Image (cartoon, rainbow, N blue to C red):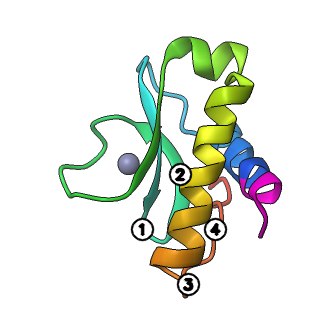
Amino acid sequence: MNQEELISVAAEAIDKRPFLPKKHYHLCHSNGHLCCLPKKHTDDPHPIFALLTYGDINLGLTPAKWNDVGKKLKKFYKEATPCIQPTVRSKP
Ligand SMILES: [Zn+2]
């Protein structure tokens, strides 16, 4: 997957985030999926690619932030963990 494809998977994860009355989410790899979850969803250490504010979620990330996220995802999925695929959990 190239960086643009990874960014579109990340955008999908953000769209599928759980709707909770929390303002701060992060984009992370958790339980085998790329997820957008409330910042304190677990105490376990896990890879985090971006901290997302209320503005990021509702107004969209800036091109610079997407670029940064894309780079981190590419590094994680390609170099660090070649056996893990960037998939998004489907909505229950
Ligand atoms: Zn997380």
Q: Residue at x 25, y 49 (%)?
A: 42
Q: Earlier in the sequence, mark 3 or mark 1?
A: 1
Which element is circle 4 on? loop
Q: Is residue 60 magenta?
A: no
Query: Which dot marks residue 31?
Result: 1
Q: Amino acid at mark 3?
A: Pro
x and y, in percent, of residue 66 in the image: 68, 36
Which element is circle 1 on? loop
The residue most toward the left is: 43
Distance from Cα at disc 3 to Cα at disc 1: 16 Å
Q: Which residue is mark 3?
A: 82
What stretch of residues is rendered in magenta?
A: 1-6
Q: Which residue is mark 4?
A: 86
Q: Earlier in the sequence, mark 4 or mark 2?
A: 2
Q: Give the answer, above or below, for where 77 lies relative to 90.
A: below
Q: Earlier in the sequence, mark 2 or mark 3?
A: 2
Q: Amino acid at mark 1?
A: Asn
Q: Residue at x 79, y 49 (%)?
A: 8
Q: Amino acid at mark 4?
A: Pro
Distance from Cα at disc 4 to Cα at disc 2: 10 Å
Decide if ligand 1 comes within 8 Å of the CB at mark 2: yes
Decide if ligand 1 comes within 8 Å of the CB at mark 4: no
x and y, in percent, of residue 83 in the image: 55, 88
